[in-house]
Each structure stands twice: as structure tokens, then as C-alpha cells.
Image: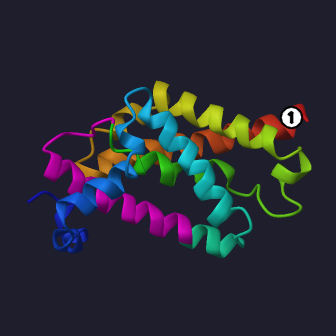
Amino acid sequence: MNSIDPYVFWTRALSTPLVVNLATIGPVGRIRKAPGTWGSVVGLAFYAVFFHHATPISFIFLAALSSYLSVAICDAAEKRLQMRDPGMIVLDEVVAVPLVFIGMGGQTGLIAEHGGWPVLLAGFALFRVFDILKPFGIARLQNLPGGLGCAIDDIAAGLAACITLHLVLHFLF
């Protein structure tokens, strides 16, 4: 029993196929070429449907809840697959992508102000860069135990991409 187990005890009640399908977002994580990129595409859809028009409080609540669920499900999936942070687990990317757009949504937010899709695509690209390269100590976060290590590096990459995107939009436009 590792230090994460007490926080994710409820995942034991879920069947292995359900846990693995949640962690891989069904077939998305099983795409042979670049499953993390495809998971990030699903993350853009997750943002558009659930976060774009959220109030700041609901954005924070939904981000915290989805991050917790991601840690728990990724932890259970790692154990059941008997693999450490396999590429097929993409739930962590899906949950992290909305974090790139903190403070940018809504009808009058930075995304709308700067033409919509260009900002979304820039955020997506920045997230992929930070997720792949893992600079600024992000790579070390993967060493944390279980699902926390699986998800926290993507969450950090999302936050780093968010800061970078805000700076780019502020200073270049």
C-alpha cells in the first residue's frame, strides 16, 4: 500500500475494464502514434464543453475535481496494468489541457478577444511542448508515487503553458 492508496480507496470498487477505459479514454490511448497528442485533442474538447463558459469558482472546482479523479483513476490503472505511467494512459492529458486556458474563457475572455481558434491552437501547442520536454523541474514530478506522479507532470505542463500563453498574449498582442 503506497501513500496514495487512502485517497483513492474507492477505485477498488471499479472493474478493471472500466478503470483502464477511463484512463485511456477508450480507444484514444490505444492509438499507436502519439496517444498523448490525441489525448490532448480530447482535452481541448473537454475544455470547450465544460470549462469555456464556467465562472471562475466553477472553473476552479471542476479543475480540482477532475485532477483528483485523474490521479485516482491513473493510480488504479497503473496498478491493474502493472505499468508505471504507460503512454496509453491519456486521462492526465485530457484533464491538464483546460488548465492552459485559466482566465481566458467566456464571451469576453482572451480567447474571444484574440480570435478564438488561434489562441486554442497556441495553447494546445504550448501544452504539448511543455508535456514532451518537461522543463523547469516538471520531469522530476513524475517520480512522485502512483497516479500522482502520472498526472502531476501534465498538470504542471498545463500551468506552465498557461503562464506562457498569458505572457505571449499580453506582450505580443
Q: Which element type, helix, strand or loop, lies under badge 1?
A: helix
User: Residue 107: percent from the left, percent from the top?
Assistant: 86, 63
Query: Dividing the image into 4 quarters, which one contains the N terminus?
Result: bottom left
Residue 166 seen in this snapshot: no
* Closer-to-camera residue (48/66): 48
User: Which quadrant of the structure image shows residue 75?
Assistant: bottom left
How has the structure been colored for display? rainbow
> What is the span of residues highlighted in magenta in the rendered image?
62-87
How packed is label 1: few (under 14 Cα within 10 Å), some, or many (20 or more)? few
Q: Relative to 151, is 55 above or below?
A: below
Instruction: From the top left corner, tell me how far across and down residue 77 is, in percent.
Output: 23, 53
Where, quadrant-wise, is the C terminus in this rendering? top right
| Amino acid type of the residue that numbered disc 1 sits on in the rendered structure | Phe
Say which of 134 and 122 sits in front.
Answer: 122
Give the residue drawn at x 62%, y 39%: 161
Q: Position of residue 60 (x, y in %)?
A: 59, 68
Residue farthest to the left?
Answer: 1
Q: Which residue is mark 1?
A: 171
User: Between 32 and 165, which is closer to the camera in this rendering?
Assistant: 32
